[in-house]
Image (cartoon, grey):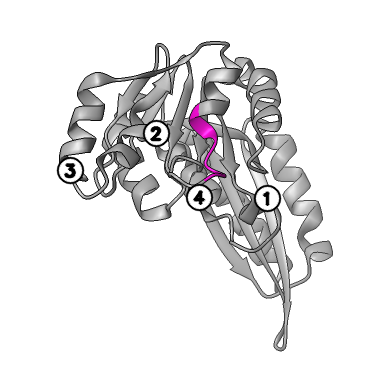
């Protein structure tokens, strides 16, 4: 099964000022393509922090996806950080710069800076905005604005398709996690290749637990979810 790591960049993310929705959106989008997300992390707008993480984690996965830091403000350092990571200079992609100058005639040189990509990077068009993304080795860099990130990812999604989709089964039960834990453990033992998760909440109407089963093997997913549903219904009687 192919694997991915997702890095979201931004001081506003690590401070909690802005919800980190890009990471969860990408992980959910990768699963139907047959890609398992192994790491999801945020770092501030700091070149050393970005480079250290990519150098350590990118060799461990098939795809390393980065979002954020592609605009034109002083804290948008992702292009510079990726050049530093791969020890290459930034170079203006002439055709890309010309297109940006034409599209943003009101401030052409401001927009042209977005074309200064790490040497060897492949530009990725931005369907909804100005700043392009790019790919270098197994690292894909996308915008931080969710609407632009989602549109750009969808435009290249087929590049990530590997093997069978990761399917899922989920049910919510009005119970406590401790009541159903033995059945969850048994399911994990019977089908070690299937991921079994439980997510409790405690509301005014009492505790509930969402149970999620995931696998890229459709037969195992069906067998495990059928057995688990029967076992949990039996415990609820």
Q: Nearer the viewer, mark 1 or mark 3?
A: 3
Label 3 crowd bin: few (<14), some (14–19), many (20+), radius 10 Å: some
The answer to which of marks 4 and 1 sits earlier in the sequence is 4
Alpha-carbon distance for marks 3 and 4?
A: 27 Å
Q: Is disc 4 in contact with disc 2, using a CB cutoff of under 8 Å?
A: no
Of 118 and 42, the residue lying toward us? 118
Q: Is residue 150 toward the left or the right of residue 229 in the image?
A: left
Q: How many marks?
A: 4
Q: Nearer the viewer, mark 4 or mark 2?
A: 4
- To which residue does mark 1 refer? 197
Alpha-carbon distance for marks 2 and 1?
A: 21 Å
Place of residue 178 in the rendered image (x, y in percent of width and height, measured from the top left): 84, 63
Place of residue 154 in the rendered image (x, y in percent of width and height, measured from the top left): 31, 41
Alpha-carbon distance for marks 2 and 3?
A: 34 Å
The residue lying at 58 percent from left, 11 percent from top is 87
- To which residue does mark 4 refer? 22
Q: Principal SS element in the magenta part? A: loop
Relative vertical location of residue 86 with respect to residue 149 in this rendering, above or below: above
Q: Nearer the viewer, mark 2 or mark 1?
A: 2
Outermost residue on the right side: it is: 178
* Numbered disc 1: secondary structure: strand
The residue lying at 26 percent from left, 49 percent from top is 128
Place of residue 191 in the rendered image (x, y in percent of width and height, measured from the top left): 65, 34
Task: Tell me if residue 1 can be seen.
Answer: no
Q: Nearer the viewer, mark 3 or mark 4?
A: 3
- To which residue does mark 2 refer? 33
Alpha-carbon distance for marks 4 and 1?
A: 22 Å
Q: Quadrant of residue 187?
A: top right
Label 4 crowd bin: few (<14), some (14–19), many (20+), radius 10 Å: many
Bounds of the magenta segment: 74-79
Q: Where, quadrant-wise, is the C terminus in this rendering?
A: bottom right
The answer to which of marks 4 and 2 sits earlier in the sequence is 4
């Amino acid at each position: 099964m192919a694997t991915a790591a997702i890095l979201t960049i931004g001081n506003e993310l690590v401070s909690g000022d802005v919800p980190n929705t890009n990471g969860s959106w990408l992980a959910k989008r990768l699963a139907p393509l047959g890609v398992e997300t192994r790491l999801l992390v945020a770092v501030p707008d700091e070149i050393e922090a970005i480079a250290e993480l990519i150098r350590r984690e990118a060799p461990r996965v098939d795809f390393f996806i980065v979002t954020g830091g592609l605009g034109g403000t002083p804290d948008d350092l992702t292009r510079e950080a990726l050049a530093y990571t791969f020890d290459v200079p930034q170079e203006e992609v002439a055709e890309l710069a010309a297109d940006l100058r034409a599209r943003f005639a009101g401030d052409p040189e401001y927009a042209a800076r977005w074309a200064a990509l790490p040497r060897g990077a492949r530009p990725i068009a931005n369907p909804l905005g100005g700043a392009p993304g790019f790919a270098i080795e197994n690292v894909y860099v996308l915008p931080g604005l969710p609407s632009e990130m989602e549109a750009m990812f969808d435009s290249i999604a087929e590049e990530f398709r590997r093997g069978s989709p990761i399917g899922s089964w989920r049910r919510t039960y009005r119970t406590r996690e401790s009541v159903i834990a033995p059945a969850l453990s048994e399911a994990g033992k019977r089908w070690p290749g299937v991921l079994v998760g439980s997510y409790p909440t405690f509301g005014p109407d009492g505790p509930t637990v969402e149970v999620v089963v995931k696998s890229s093997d459709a037969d195992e997913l069906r067998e495990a979810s059928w057995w688990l549903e029967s076992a949990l219904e039996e415990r609820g009687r």
